[in-house]
Amino acid sequence: MKKWYWVNLVLFVMFSVSAAAVTSVIVRHNTGADFAKGTTDGVVIDSNGTVRLARHTEHVDCGDLLKEVWAIHTILTDARGALFLGTGPNGRVIRIVGDQAVQVYPQPDPNAAAPSDILNQHVFALGLDVADRLLVGISGEKGKLVRI
C-alpha cells in the first residue's frame, strides 16, 4: 500500500509541476506595420487597424479593357448576375459575366484606330430601368444619360 502511495505522490508532483509551466501570452498589434509583417487570409485590415472578415473575391482578367482606365467610379449588378463597371476618363462601361469582360459603352469599333487623346468623360452613375435596361450617367463637357 505504501508503494502505491509513493507512486501516486510522484505522479501528482510530476503533473502539477508541468501544469504550472503553461502560461498564456497576450499579443497586441497596434500599428499597420505590425499587421504588415504577417499574412492575411479571408480578412480585411482597414486604415484604423480594425480586422474584419473579408468578402469572397475573384480575379477577373479584363485584358486591355482597363488599360486606359484611371478610376472605376461606380459598380452595378443586375438580376442575371452581370457586373457593370463605370469608368473614367474615357467614359467606358465594362460588363463582366463569369470570367469574361466586354466593353458595352461606347460600342468598340474594330476598324477604328486606338484614340490617343482623353475624352474627359466619366461614368459616375449606373442604374436599371423598369425594363431591366442599363442606364448610364456620363459627365463631361455636356453631361448625358444613355440607355443601353
Image: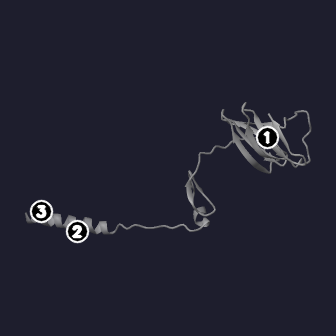
Which residue lies at the image location 90% right of the left edge and 48% below the top edge?
A: 141
Q: Which mark is residue 4?
A: 3
What element does badge 3 sit on?
A: helix
What element does badge 2 sit on?
A: helix
Q: What amino acid type should be assigned to the residue bearing mark 2? A: Val
Q: Residue furthest front?
A: 130
* Chain-order first, disc 3 or disc 1: 3
Which residue lies at the image location 57% right of the left edge and 61% below the top edge?
A: 50
Mark 1 crowdedness (10 Å alpha carbons): few <14, some 14-19, many ≥20: many
Between the residue at mark 3 and the residue at mark 2, the CA separation in whole angstroms equals 14 Å
Which residue lies at the image location 58% right of the left edge and 51% below the top edge?
A: 54
Which residue is tagged 2?
13
Which residue lies at the image location 56% right of the left edge and 68% below the top edge?
A: 30
Look at the picture and state if 52 lies above or below 96: below
Q: Which mark is residue 24?
A: none
What element does badge 1 sit on?
A: strand
Residue 51 image point, x, y percent: 56, 58
Which residue is tagged 1?
136
Judge from the rendering whether residue 45 lies leftward or rightward of residue 147; answer left or right: left
